[in-house]
Amino acid sequence: MVDLFDLSLVLWAVIPPLLLLGYYSCRIPFAPPPLRLLMFFLIGALSGILALSLEWIFEIVANWFVDWQQIRGWLPGIALRQILEVGSIEESCKLAAVVVPTYYLQRRYQLLPSSVFLFTIAIAFGFTAEENWVYLFYGTASIIDRTIGTPVHAMFSAPWGYALGIYISSNTRLNRDKKFIVRAWLNSIICHALVNVLSSAWRYSLPLRFLSYGLFPFLLWMFWRLEQLLRKVQGKRSITLISGNTPQRRYWQSSLVLFALVLGGNAIFGLFLLARVLSPLNPSKLFDSDILWFILTRFSLNLFFGVLAWGIYRYLRHSAPPRYF
């Protein structure tokens, strides 16, 4: 455990989410002022503290009825905990953190869907910063692990952030739009739970351990979904990869999309494992012939799979008729 107010700890927890928030802010025209986004970022961090407290209370209450610690020790129990406790509490806290300040802002301003979506991203990154601090403070995750996982909460919350943006910016708020928010929120909970289950699958014996190879392809798909929703809130046309006119053609393109996700996701996974293996080493050791050969072979192999996945993506984009661009 490290000092509570260790400056380097705070910087490693906060700077990566802030940099990503600045990146998404620059990509959206007519983005809210930086100070307002920073306010949402701080509210997101507070929502992370609230979620952590509610999860602690949930476990105390759950232990009154069942042996919750024992249930958490096997895979179905982990899945149940992720849906009932982690996913539902964290996504609800983030949703409330967006809705409450946005309610007051919309009384003074006409909010664009892109602004509400960016508020959601700011809340998610603030939540991530708080979570980073907790993991680093207790030493339960490395800096590399937390840095790579920086965009994950934004990818979780993107569906209900998009639905909320459409609802708030609409002049005619229909009941179906409210149902859209609820469905998107449930989707986020399920995706949140599934990612956490896949990330814990490596602890189990075969064949359950193979589930961990689905983590990064699924994360890559969620990143793609985040990018698509970002285009939609800006009024841009979605990028369509499956555009065949026949069932056979669409089946072929769907298979290529799945293949690209598997290749690309596990190429990223391979680079992540390489970085994790090399991080404890002294920098001077990296130039030893055996270690250098290991780095070059592993990096080249994963780069090959990544480039192949990118090539499939470019092929699918260019095979779509112009109307799909």
Image (cartoon, rainbow, N blue to C red):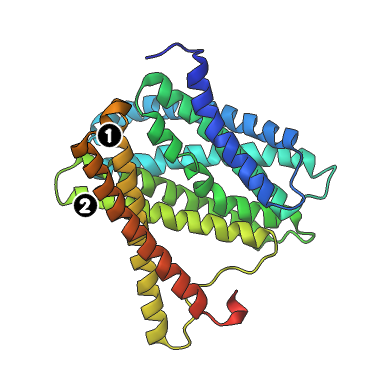
**Quarter the N terminus occupies:** top left
Residue drawn 51% across and 12% down?
Answer: 5
Q: Which of 26 and 280 is in front in this view?
A: 280
Q: Quadrant of residue 232?
A: bottom right
> How many neighbours does mark 2 have within 10 angstroms: few (below 14), some (14-19), or many (20 or more)?
some
Q: Which of 297 and 20 is in front in this view?
A: 297
Mark linked to residue 210: 2
Q: Mark 1 points at which residue?
A: 287
Above or below 288: residue 234: below
Residue 19 placement, left or right of 169: left
Residue 78 placement, left or right of 253: left
Residue drawn 27% across and 55% down?
Answer: 301
Name which residue type carries label 2. Answer: Phe
Name which residue type carries label 1. Answer: Phe
Q: Choose mark 2 or mark 1, whichever is in front.
A: 1
Q: Which of 286 and 103 is in front in this view?
A: 286
Question: Residues under labels 2 and 1: Cα distance?
Answer: 33 Å
In the rendered image, residue 122, in percent from the top left (x then y), is placed at 62, 39
